[in-house]
């Protein structure tokens, strides 16, 4: 099994933005959250999805959690965006214990065997995949990002501006 890495290396946080390959379809996603609810992308069509792959041992992952929570809270009333955190291969008990100290305002899904991370990412954490209203992945963001800042807005605004009706 390949080892997962965490970005950034020592020094200032950095991110890499990669457009999703045009011919690469969205991989399947069928994961349970901490409440036992099964999540997939089909019911979320018409909304922008922020699919964040993380682990509690990854410092940049932990650093960006508050801005992901802010993003989820800001868009909750509008219903136009969903944030999903996908935890990489950590036991449910460990994830629950971690979240007692670092609360989140979005569902946390459990990637128990690492298959979701393997199909969606290069297994460098954090990686966030932005999925448009049409259900197609648009961009991967590798590394920590301030989702409440200008870079987050720049990435999300075009996806949010797309017509929900056109994506159904």
Image: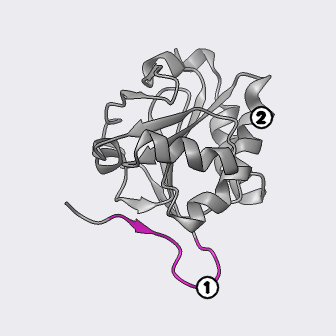
Task: Find residue 66 and name its label.
Answer: none
Q: Secondary structure at mark 2?
A: helix
- The outermost residue toward the bottom is 11
Q: Position of residue 64 (x, y in %)?
A: 66, 57
Q: Position of residue 83 (x, y in %)?
A: 61, 36
* Cβ atoms under marks 2 and 1 closer than 8 Å: no
Badge 2: residue crowd in 10 Å (few <14, some 14–19, many ≥20)? some
Q: Position of residue 62 (x, y in %)?
A: 61, 59
Taking the magenta stretch, the answer to whether it contains residue 10 is yes
Q: Nearer the viewer, residue 87 or 90?
A: 90
**Residue occupying the point 47% across, 28% down:** 135
- Residue tagged by mark 2? 73
Q: Nearer the viewer, residue 64 or 48?
A: 64
* Residue 32 appears in the figure: yes
**Residue occupying the point 53% across, 21% down:** 44
In the rendered view, would you say 143 is above or below 87? below
Q: Position of residue 5 (x, y in %)?
A: 39, 68
Task: Find residue 11 and name its label.
Answer: 1
In the rendered view, would you say 102 is above or below 16? above
Of the image marks 2 and 1, the number of the one nearer the N terminus: 1
In the rendered view, would you say 48 is above or below 140? above
Disc 2 to disc 1, how far (Cα)? 30 Å
Which span of residues is magenta-colored? 4-14
Q: Quadrant of the N terminus?
A: bottom left
- The outermost residue toward the left is 1
């Amino acid at each position: 099994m390949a080892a997962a890495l965490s970005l950034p290396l020592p020094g200032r946080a950095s991110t890499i933005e990669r457009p999703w390959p045009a011919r690469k379809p969205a991989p399947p996603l069928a994961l349970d959250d901490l409440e036992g609810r099964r999540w997939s992308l089909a019911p979320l069509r018409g909304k922008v999805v922020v699919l964040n792959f993380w682990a509690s041992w990854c410092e940049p992952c932990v650093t960006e959690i508050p801005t992901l929570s802010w993003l989820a809270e800001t868009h909750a009333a509008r219903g136009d965006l969903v944030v999903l955190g996908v935890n990489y291969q950590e036991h449910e008990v460990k994830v629950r214990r971690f979240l007692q100290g670092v609360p989140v305002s979005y569902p946390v899904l459990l990637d128990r065997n690492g298959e979701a991370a393997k199909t969606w990412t290069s297994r460098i954490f954090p990686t966030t995949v932005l999925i448009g209203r049409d259900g197609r992945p648009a961009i991967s963001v590798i590394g920590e990002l301030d989702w409440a800042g200008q870079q987050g807005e720049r990435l999300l605004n075009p996806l949010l501006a797309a017509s929900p009706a056109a994506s159904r």
